[in-house]
Image (cartoon, rainbow, N blue to C red):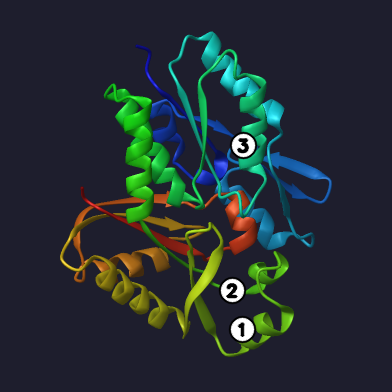
Amino acid sequence: MSQVRIVTDSTSDIPAELRRELGIETVPLQVLFGSEAFRDAVDISADEFYDRLAGSKVSPTTSQPSPVEFLEVYQKLADAGSGPIISLHLSSAMSGTFQSAQLAKSMIEDKADVTVYDSRSASYGFGLLAVAAASAARQGKSKEDILALIDKLRSGTRIYFLVDTLEYLHRGGRIGKAAALFGSLLNIKPILSIHDEGQVYSVDKVRGTKKAIARIGNMLQTDFGDRPVHLSLAYSKGQENVKELESQLKPLLQIESISYTQIGSVIGTHTGPGTIAVFAFPAY
């Protein structure tokens, strides 16, 4: 039986080296500065994006892939004789990317076994699912076993984001102008997560970055207690705050492993520079 293949999109924020190592196919979203369009993690790196963002008078926007872009990947894998395809994507509550993948699946159903999975998550919150799925596929696991693993990991993962400024949440329509202005004046740092329906929500609001980082540590300690956990820490530009987060978490949690990834241009468009995130899941 041919190996299961994993497809995802660029908002999974999986490091390029890891994607290549595991053979994960990735369909890029686009980030646009006015009339200039860049494929996320293809035409523009995360660092290039944040540098451009700092000097741009134009607010960037983002665009989902077309069904044809997904179809091309599914067709390539089918032509190469792959086994079933599991295609994991950014929450359908945040983007039409999942729907594009679903449309592509309907165009190739007679040639390929494609399962399109709504992660109801974002960034490495579903990137870690794709990595685990690809690792299981390398071990010869079946489609059904891999989907069960994804479900288990997704339900067990805890995600907390901390944004440096409320400006980008306001630009993206996540919060109103008054809330953004009031929060900025008071140095309010919203701690964000993603609920079961796949939308971003505010877990707590704390004054100052250091207090917010400490609060994240306390919440994770409540979430996991003495259970061993794996941590993935994500940063946008600069690792100072994420290193501070790591130092706060080490005394509080039974950490099995720590990995790092960078938040790419599409997610960064909506969260801004200085964003940090922690993705924690039990060591099963």
Q: Is mark 2 on a helix, strand or loop?
A: loop
Of badges 3 and 1, nearer the viewer stands: 3
The part of the image, by quadrant, that contains residue 23 is: top left
Q: Bin the neighbour count of mark 2 within 10 Å (Cα to Cα): few under 14, some 14-19, many 20 and up.
A: many
Of badges 2 and 3, nearer the viewer stands: 3
Q: Bin the neighbour count of mark 1 within 10 Å (Cα to Cα): few under 14, some 14-19, many 20 and up.
A: some
Residue in view at x 45 percent, y 14 percent: 82
Which residue type does callout 2 highlight? Answer: Thr
Q: Is residue 142 above or below residue 241?
A: above
Earlier sequence position, callout 2 versus callout 1? 2
Residue 218 showing in the rendered view: yes
Residue in view at x 67 percent, y 21 percent: 107
Earlier sequence position, callout 3 versus callout 1? 3
Q: Where is residue 215 in the image (x, y as percent from the top left)?
A: 36, 78
Q: Position of residue 143 (x, y in %)?
A: 38, 27
Which residue type does callout 1 highlight? Answer: Ser
Which residue type does callout 3 highlight? Answer: Pro
Which residue is labeled 2 in the image?
A: 165
Q: Is residue 23 above or below residue 167?
A: above
Earlier sequence position, callout 2 versus callout 3? 3
Residue 28: which numbered mark, if any? 3
Q: Position of residue 151 (x, y in %)?
A: 37, 45
Residue 184: which numbered mark, if any? 1
Measured Cα–Cα span from mark 3 to mark 1: 33 Å
Q: What element carries label 1?
A: helix
For residue 173, side relative to residue 204 (left or right): right
The part of the image, by quadrant, that contains residue 158 is: bottom left
Q: Do the residues labelled 2 and 1 touch (CB within 8 Å)?
A: yes
Q: Position of residue 137 (x, y in %)?
A: 34, 26
Of 83 and 49, the residue lying toward us: 83
Residue in view at x 63 percent, y 60 percent: 270
Q: What element carries label 3?
A: loop
